[in-house]
Image (cartoon, rainbow, N blue to C red):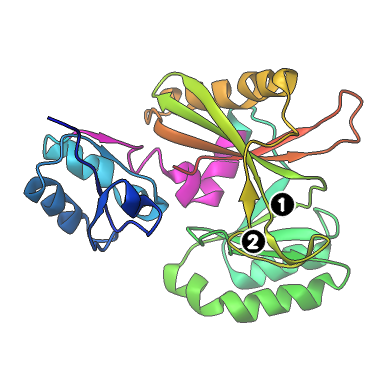
Amino acid sequence: MPARFVAAPGNPGIARLARTVALDLGDLEACLSLADREQIDFTIVGPELPLSLGIADRFHDAGRLLFGPTAAAARLESSKAFAKAFMARHGVPTARFSVCESLEESLECVRRGELGVPVVLKADGLAAGKGVVIAGDRASRRARDYRRDGRAKIRRRRRPHGHRECLNGPEVSFFCVCDGTRGVPIGTAQDHKRIFDDDSGPNTGGMGAFAPSPLLDAPLEARVMREIVDPVMAGMVVEGCPFRGFLYVGLMLDAGRPEGDRVQRAPGRS
């Protein structure tokens, strides 16, 4: 019997390969009901939202096979504060950062200039790639804009802000499939976040992408595995939440380094 694929909610592209079904990905019981109704043997989750809500845990409790991290492991993506603190604990190279618990503390951190100018400000939690403000030379004014635009969302969620130093260089994505102890590289991509040409304007969820990226050669890929992926996998085991799923490694490459590149990362979109 040929394999049968169901994609929920799907899109016109995947509709050529699978039957698409309307689904609210934030409703875990609806997701489980769909798997039961369609007699799905194996579920693969891509979007961050259901993973952050614990769809892997829910399917496990129901005895259904699903490939994706638990809610605890998915914090690598769903909580920037957790991800940055995790990287610091396990020696994973990353930009200098601080975490602020209130909008006022966040604004004061920018004013003090502890992380230099420009500084990158991020609201904790999922933001579909659009939760970033890069505060430039007029840092205080930009921070006020950030406070104004983010006040309702951040206070409603009662989540902290993350601040990090601004890294210059191309952004590259590095993907691994992970079994809880090991990560195996499966490809790279390069996308463009800012809305205008010449890398200018505000960040978006992405203005376009291409794959593979020509910036990651074999020696650099080996370095990413050695310095980032392997420590992340080991660290998640130590912390009691092994990562199983697709690990997204966001890299900033600084070509000014003698060896060619300085690698930074923010783990783990699935």
For the N terminus, give its image quadrant: top left
Task: Tell me which residue sits at (53%, 58%) in the image.
Answer: 124
For the C terminus, give its image quadrant: top left
- In this rendering, which labeled residue sits more in front, label 1 or label 2? 2
Q: In the figure, residue 100 lies in which quadrant?
A: bottom right
Q: In the figure, residue 92 lies in which quadrant?
A: top right
Decide which of tag 1 and tag 2 comes sooner along the chain: 1
The mark found on residue 8 in the picture is none
The image shows residue 125, relative to residue 233, as above or below, that is below
The image shows residue 3, relative to residue 185, as above or below, that is below
The mark found on residue 207 in the picture is 2
SS class, disc 2: loop
Q: In screen coordinates, is 123 left or right of 53? A: right
Task: Tell me the CA gap for discs 1 and 2.
Answer: 23 Å
Task: Tell me which residue sits at (68%, 37%) in the image.
Answer: 213
Q: In the figure, residue 122 lies in which quadrant?
A: bottom right
SS class, disc 1: strand
Which residue sits furthest bottom? 148
Is 36 or 160 nearer to us in this picture?
36
Report the magenta residues as a range.
65-87
Q: Label 1 is placed on what type of residue? A: Arg
Q: In screen coordinates, is 6 left or right of 177? A: left
In the rendered image, residue 82 lying in the magenta stretch gets the answer yes
* Mark 1 neighbour density, 10 Å: few (under 14) some (14–19) many (20 or more): many
Which residue position is annotated with label 1? 164
x then y, percent, for residue 102: 58, 68
x then y, percent, for residue 3: 20, 34
